[in-house]
């Protein structure tokens, strides 16, 4: 399970909550941006971090310096991260964001394998997972759109498997999705508000 500690752990204190989450067994700390990851590293936290928000190419070196896993959906970010990782002599884990209907960030399912191949041939970076964000589940009334999203996500996953990407971590579920739609739990849940009792 990944525990979301973005936005100062929803106001509860990012460093203290991160330490508590790791002590309780969290496998990954999830932040929104490079600044939050940098803050955790400055506090001496060496556990796995995943930056779930979008990354501008000019932030690539700072992101690489944190050693965090990163979400990508565009070639320009892939190129910038590869160059920064090579310069820093590091290998950075990437998670491919799949666009499944929210139209905020992501690569279309039919284009996912092409972007994965680009990642595969660039030095300093490695494709570790695929992800999406399931919407409209918080009210607990209707999961139709989220189920359609999960179907699109599976189209992308099948395309990637056909292209030889067989060991990718799949994650889509936030707190609400994990509770309302157990099929969305896949390989990891990104537990946010539920961690804090909401």
Image (cartoon, rainbow, N blue to C red):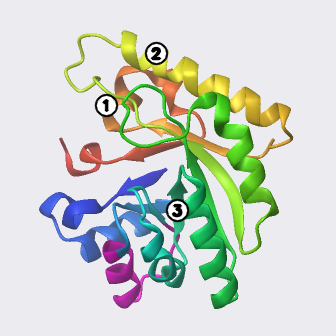
Question: Relative to 82, does residue 135 appear above or below in the rendering?
Answer: above
Camera-near label (2 vs 1) is 2
Residue at position x 66%, y 35% in the image = 111
Q: Earlier in the sequence, mark 2 or mark 1?
A: 2
Q: Which residue is disc 1 drawn over?
A: 176
Residue at position x 61%, y 30% in the image = 109
Query: Helix, strand or loop at disc 1?
Result: helix
Query: Helix, strand or loop at disc 2?
Result: helix
Q: Residues within 10 Å of mark 3 (few under 14, many from 20)?
A: many
Residue 180 image offset from top left, x and y in percent: 35, 21
Residue at position x 28%, y 61% in the image = 6
Q: Earlier in the sequence, mark 1 or mark 3?
A: 3
Q: Disc 1 vs disc 3: Cβ atoms closer than 8 Å?
A: no
- Looking at the rendering, the stretch of residues picked out in magenta corresponds to 35-49
Query: Helix, strand or loop at disc 3?
Result: strand
Question: Relative to 192, does residue 39 appear above or below in the rendering?
Answer: below
Question: Relative to 158, does residue 133 appear above or below in the rendering?
Answer: below
Q: Which residue is disc 2 drawn over?
A: 147
* Residue 184 located left or right of residue 136: right
Q: Say which quarter of the image contains residue 5.
A: bottom left
Q: How many angstroms separate mark 3 from mark 2 (CA)?
A: 25 Å
Q: Which residue is disc 3 drawn over?
A: 70
Q: Residues within 10 Å of mark 2 (few under 14, many from 20)?
A: some
Camera-near label (1 vs 3) is 3
Was residue 124 drawn as part of the magenta stretch in this picture? Answer: no
């Amino acid at each position: 399970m990944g525990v979301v500690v973005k936005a100062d752990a929803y106001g509860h204190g990012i460093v203290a909550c991160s330490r508590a989450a790791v002590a309780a067994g969290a496998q990954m700390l999830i932040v929104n941006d490079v600044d939050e990851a940098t803050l955790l590293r400055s506090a001496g936290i060496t556990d796995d971090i995943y930056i779930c928000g979008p990354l501008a190419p000019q932030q690539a070196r700072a992101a690489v310096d944190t050693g965090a896993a990163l979400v990508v959906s565009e070639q320009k970010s892939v190129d910038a991260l590869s160059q920064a990782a090579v310069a820093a002599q590091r290998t950075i884990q990437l998670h491919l964001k799949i666009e499944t209907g929210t139209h905020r960030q992501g690569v279309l399912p039919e284009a996912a394998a092409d972007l994965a191949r680009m990642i595969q041939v660039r030095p300093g970076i490695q494709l570790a997972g695929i992800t999406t964000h399931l919407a409209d589940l918080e009210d607990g009334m209707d999961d139709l759109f989220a189920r359609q999203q999960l179907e699109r996500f599976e189209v992308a996953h099948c395309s990637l498997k056909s292209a030889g990407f067989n060991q990718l971590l799949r994650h889509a579920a936030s707190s609400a999705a994990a509770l309302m739609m157990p099929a969305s739990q896949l390989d990891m849940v990104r537990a946010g508000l539920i961690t804090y009792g909401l």
